[in-house]
Structures are given as C-alpha cells and as structure tokens.
Amino acid sequence: MSRDSVLNHAYAVILAGGSGTRFWPASRRRRPKQLLEGTFGPGTLLQRTVARIRPLIPADRTYVFTNTLLKRPIAKLLPEIPSRQIVAEPAARNTAPALGLAAQEILRRDPEGIMVVLPSDHLITKPAVFRSVIRAAIQAGSTEGRSVLVGLKPSSAHTGFGYIRQGSEISPLAGHRIFRAQSFIEKPPADVAAQYVAAGDYLWNGGMFVWRASTILANLARFKPGIAHSLKRIAEAGTRSAATRKRIYPKIEKISIDYAVVQQADDVYVIPAEMGWSDVGSWSEVYTLRSKDKRRNARPARSLCYDAQGNLIVADKFVAAVDVQDLVIIETADAILVANRNRAQDVGKAVVELERRGWEDLL
C-alpha cells in the first residue's frame, strides 16, 4: 500500500473505561477522569483525544471502548462518532480482551485494517508532533506481524510507568527513527529508574500501539488461545453477538495487552517521541499545569492564601488557607479532599477504603 492508502485503512481505538480514582472526589464512576470538564484545560481529555487524531483518522473510523455506565454520556459528548462505534464492555477485563474485540470489528469491516490504540486520559501539548509520530507508526505497523509502540522520552526517573529499552535501529520512516523493542520493565524502583534515564536508551511506555487487526488477533491466538477462542465465539454469534458477548465476555481472563501479547511478541518496534506528553496521573500534576500566585499557590481568584504556599485549591466555595503548605484541597457538592500534595498518588487508596466501608454514594 502507498502512504496515502495506508492511512485510509487506519482506525482509531480509544480506551475510555478507566475510573480515575486518583482524581476523587471530582472523578467518580459515572464521571471519571477522562470526562472531567475543564480540569485539565478546555473540554475533556476524551474530547481532546478524539480531536487530536481526527486530522489523520475521521470519526467514522474511530471507536471508543468503555463500560456500560459511561456509554450514554460518551455518546452525548461525542455526537460525531456513530453510536455503534461506542462499545460498552459487559465487564472490565483489562485491555487485551477489549482490543481483541476491537480487532474483530475492524477486521470484519476492513481486512487490511490497522489499529491505532490510544488512551483517552492523557495530555499532549504538541498535537502536530503526535500526528507526525502516529503517521510514521501507521506506515510501520501496516506490515503484517509487526507491532509498533510510541515511546516517550523520559523527563524524570518516574517509578509509576513501564519502560521500553531500545534495541537496534531500522530504517527511518517519515522522518522518525525506529528501533526494535529490546525489553520491557514494569514500574522499576527509583534507583533503577534513575539508571534507565541516565543510560539514554530507555523510553516510557505511554500505552499507544499500532498494528494490523489481523496481527493482534494472530498474536492473541498464539499467546492467549483461551482469550482468542472466547472472542471467536462472540464474533461467530452473528445476530446474537450482543447476548453472546454479555454471557461470555465476563468470563474471559482479565489481563493487559502488554502482559498478554506485547512483551512476548516478535517484531515489536518503538518510535521515540517528545510530544509534551503527560498521563496527568494525580492532583499534583494538575498543580504543575495551573498558573500560580507569587507563593506558588494554584487557586481560584476568589480565595485567600495567608502565609500559605505551594497549595492546589479546586473549589466553587470560598476557601481560606492559613499557614499551610503543599496541600491539595478539592471541593465538590458532596465531598472535600485535603491531602499532602506530595502524597496525591495515594488518593486512589482512599477510594479503595471508601469502597471497603460501603460508602457507594461517594464512588
């Protein structure tokens, strides 16, 4: 296929089923991180994801995979996407089964279909660079059997991300260098992450994948035949596929695509990129995105910080903060969060505790 014809076979698969517990109390099961309006800038992260890929892949070739709670609000948020392409999984089974379902649908529609898998809840401040990288990845991923990842050049020794080690370089495509993926490391300790960053040949795994639909289904059949068999039964159900999916899908193994396929497959490549990427994984990262006063407080204009510094305040009510520092103060209609900004990653643990105590109305 020529470069232009390859793009005509590209389909976006946007994963939008996460709960975003680290952004409680703003984020809830019915309004998770990717659907929060204005928290991370204009619109929602999901809308910005769809808008970012649209110059390459139109809405009629864009799929959104989510859960049953979110299908209706997502359809309302994204009226340009055909409703049949907003797919609600009957149960949360992680990314391997979801992407297998997506691959079946795309392969049924287009035997030469190429999947561009994108998270819905990340922030990218250089969308033109993103599209240039994805265009190169689509060209590389159009080869049968090949899987292509987008690797983010690390800006810190972050311990919450997976790392990809670059191997040998192959011929560049569309002005981008491409390397074999030599190895994968999940969430290393701080000292090891620092070594990776210093070495210069490790990249963050941002969860962006490109491959032919036929390639991922073949790899699932090879490495996870149980999942592949269940997905095949769903695909063969025809007019009964919805009922069959509801019956079979919740029994499928719950596993990520990284563990199920990517870390085992042959012909896996990575394209390094610097695109202003952030997974905005906690309130502390929202703090870094917002403008601040002279004492480094990110706060509404109608608020008071007296002898206070380094705080994040997100509230409609008037908040006065006195002689405190490095706090996260988040107010919603039914809850208030006060946390140490340096421990903002642990807000998700508080949500687990809420669930354990049976406070379902707050989830």
Image (cartoon, rainbow, N blue to C red):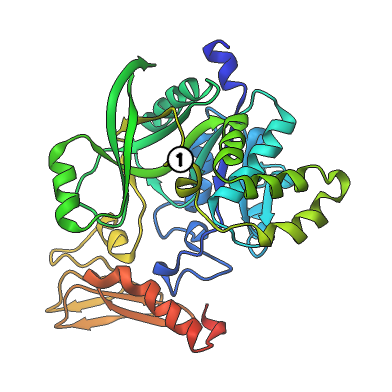
Q: Mark 1 points at which residue?
A: 262
SS state under label 1: helix
Where is residue 332, by image quadrant? bottom left
Q: Which sits in the foreground, 112 or 28?
A: 112
Residue 299 in the image: above or below residue 241: below
Horizontal relation, residue 41 to residue 323: left or right: right
Horizontal relation, residue 188 to residue 33: left or right: left
- The answer to whether residue 201 of the structure is visible from this angle is yes
Q: Position of residue 166 (x, y in %)?
A: 28, 32
Q: Tell me what residue is drawn at x 73 percent, y 47 percent.
A: 83
Where is residue 326, by image quadrant? bottom left
Residue type, label 1: Val
Residue found at the far top of this picture: 2
Where is residue 108, by image quadrant? top right
Residue 177 in the image: above or below residue 218: above
Residue found at the far bottom of this picture: 357
Horizontal relation, residue 228 to residue 4: left or right: right
Residue 307 in the image: above or below residue 44: below
Q: Tell me what residue is drawn at x 88 percent, y 46 percent.
A: 239
- The answer to whether residue 300 of the structure is visible from this angle is no
Q: Which sits in the foreground, 94 or 55?
A: 94
Q: Tell me what residue is drawn at x 52 percent, y 20 percent.
A: 143
Quadrant occupied by the N terminus? top right
Q: Where is residue 18 in the image (x, y as percent from the top left)?
A: 51, 60
Residue 40 in the image: above or below residue 360: above
